[in-house]
Image (tube, grey):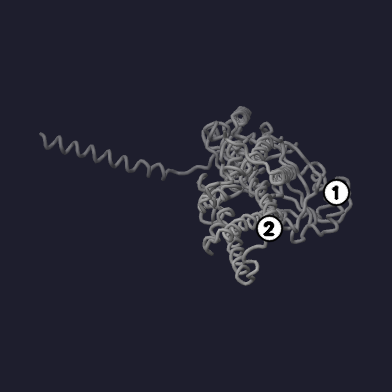
Amino acid sequence: MRSRIKRLTLAVLACLVVICLNTPLLAQSSPSTAPSPQTPTQSREVVGRQPIRGGWYPWDPYQYLEGSAGRRDLTGLDVRLLREAFQGELGRDLELSEVSWKQHQLDLRNGLRDVAGGAFRTAERETYAHYSKPYRFEEVVVYRRRLEPIGSQALQNSKTLQQELDSGSSKIGLVRGYHYGKAIAAFAADQRHARRIVWADDHEANLRNLRYGKVQLAPVDRLVGATIVWRNKWTVELVSSTFTVFRDSIHVLFSKLTTDPALVKQFDEAIAAMQKDGRYNRIVQHYLFPVLLAQTVGQDWFYILEIVGTVAFALSGILIAQRDDFSLFGAFVLALLPAVGGGIIRDLIINRDVTAVLRSPISLLVVIALVLLSALLIRVLPKIGRLPSNLRIEPIIDVLDAVALAAYTVVGVIVAIETRCEPLLLWGPLLSALTGAGGSILRDVVRGDAEYPTLRHSLYAEIAMVWGLGLAAFLNVYAKADTYDPMQLQTAILLTMLGVLVTRLVVIGKRIRAPRFR
């Protein structure tokens, strides 16, 4: 009896195993049927359960790939805002695949994609898409080659540009599907101008055509154009118009076939919540400000000021080494610490991936060259072994040192933004002071100077902190602007540097000492 029950139990278990193993195979082997066309209502029900489908194309700093060749991640202002809104606020997955802007619009029209960020409002798009509320603004400018006579004449003002569009002979580069405003849209729609238009799939390709002379004019979003030109080091060759061709609000498009106004309203509320709690401004600061600031500090004149500052800091250490009879290596240490020590301390405190001195060896090479040259002069020219009493180099070094402090004050605020040190009003001035004065403090500690002039008497780090705070305050206000004109930011940086320079020179001239603690 027991053996019969046992055999029956084993048989039942065997049947269950066979059924479980074959169920997926049966499901897979069943005849497949093509999906039936969905009505708009059915499509909206499906998107309510599935990830939201979007897309992207190269449009730095709004949409771009970041990272090394081995791993490149999709990021950018629009990418981050949409992910934060859909995934962070609404709890919806967002899928973004690369697609040209023209194809993206066709996919929205046909219900193959659900959303598209960074879009102007046009009558054509209203036929197939719902619009979110504006979440930022864009300005379109026109680029030309710096030495191109036709482009120079056409970009004197908006009137000369319109004349060139209507009756000129220059070729215009345009991106498929992008809206440049009524004037350029009318030009593109006129079949008489078809041979004058050179189409591109993205803005970088369009500006590259301009650089190679395939077109004479290339309209583009102001910030996108400035970013592409800066990253590719085309600033010497390409220049933009000083006037704005077109300015309008930017929206997110929602396909009418797959979404409904309720989702649009939820998205608008998500953006409003992000603006209210400060996340929106922080995202703007993270993606736009490093690019805007780098376009200024990446220019040749700022690079020269940084080199001048490195020379000034190194010379101050060399003079101390010569006066106190340090060894050659000691002179190198005293010259190197004020030149790069502040940046090293700053980068260690904020846990930066790679310190500034390791990113570029220029500062290190300048210090080495100055130390060796000074040692050679002291030995070859015995009369300079001890500087004559009537020869004063200190005033010159003081001026160069003030220039260095001005440049390093700006660098400190930029590093605070790049590394997301929040709040900026706290970390901006602190990193400015560390970058400008940290190296001098470290040098005094190493050489055992009990006076510690940077900490006790000299009004030095305080200057960097005050003007760094002013620049950080401006950037906080600037983050709330509708558009971001690089010229405004460059002006703020120049005023900050000028303020630091003048303040430091006045302190030196008037012999103003730092306020006492007691």
Tag nearer the camera, 1 or 2: 2
Find residue 91 and report its horizontal and vertical position in percent.
Answer: 52, 32
Give the quarter of the image for residue 53: top right
Residue 128 appears in view:
no
Which mark sits nearer the N-terminus, 1 or 2? Answer: 1
Kind of residue at disc 2? Ile
Please give the count of numbered marks on the rendered protein: 2
Q: Are marks 1 and 2 in contact (CB under 8 Å)?
A: no
Task: Tell me the tag on residue 393.
Answer: 2
Find residue 308 and report its horizontal and vertical position in percent.
Answer: 67, 56
- Residue at which label 1 appears: 161
Considering the image in quadrants, where does the C terminus appear?
Answer: top right
Most extreme residue toward the front, as rendered? 389
Tell me which residue sits at (70%, 53%) in the image: 395
Find residue 360 and report its horizontal and vertical position in percent.
Answer: 58, 58
Tell me which residue sits at (60%, 36%) in the image: 516
